[in-house]
Image (spheres, grey):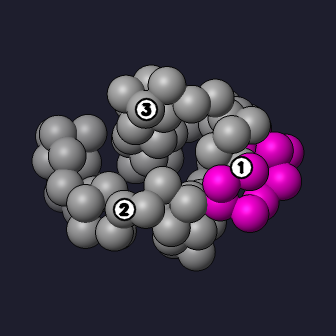
Amino acid sequence: MSAVKNAVVQRFKNICNIRNIAANELANISGVTPSTVYSLFSNERKNVSITTIKILCDGLNITLGEFFSSPEFDNLEQEIK
């Protein structure tokens, strides 16, 4: 799993843990299928689209800015060296 994708997954898992909601509930409140969320969380899936992130953020009633403003993303290494 790429570092960026891992950070996205960790961020969603952290938000769900704080709010005490399961992956199925995240799917339901976001209007996507549970398989979409489970696929996102899967190590086999290499990438995630910004559209999917936005839809899940909408379900959580947070902005993309709020989602990405966290240590998971601040601590990522530079991709271009």
Q: From this viewpoint, is residue 29 visible? A: yes
Q: Secondary structure at mark 1?
A: helix
- x then y, percent, for residue 46: 64, 48
Q: Which residue in the protein does label 1 denote?
A: 27
Indicate the amino acid at tag 1. Answer: Ala
Q: Upstream in the sequence, badge 2 or badge 1?
A: 1
Q: What residue lies at 34% left-to-right and 68% top-to-bottom? A: 64
Indicate the amino acid at tag 2. Answer: Ile
Q: Is residue 32 magenta?
A: yes
Between the C-alphas of marks 2 and 3, the distance is: 13 Å
Taking 31 as reference, is 15 left or right?
left
Q: Which numbered disc, 1 or 3, marks the residue closer to the eye?
A: 3
Q: Which residue in the protein does label 2 denote?
A: 62
Q: Upstream in the sequence, badge 1 or badge 3?
A: 3
- Residue 19, numbered label: 3
Classify mark 2: residues with Cα within 10 Å, few (<14), some (14-19) or many (20+): few
Classify mark 1: residues with Cα within 10 Å, few (<14), some (14-19) or many (20+): many
- x then y, percent, for residue 57: 47, 61
Quadrant in the picture for residue 48: bottom right
- x then y, percent, for residue 9: 50, 39
Q: Main secondary structure of the magenta part?
A: helix
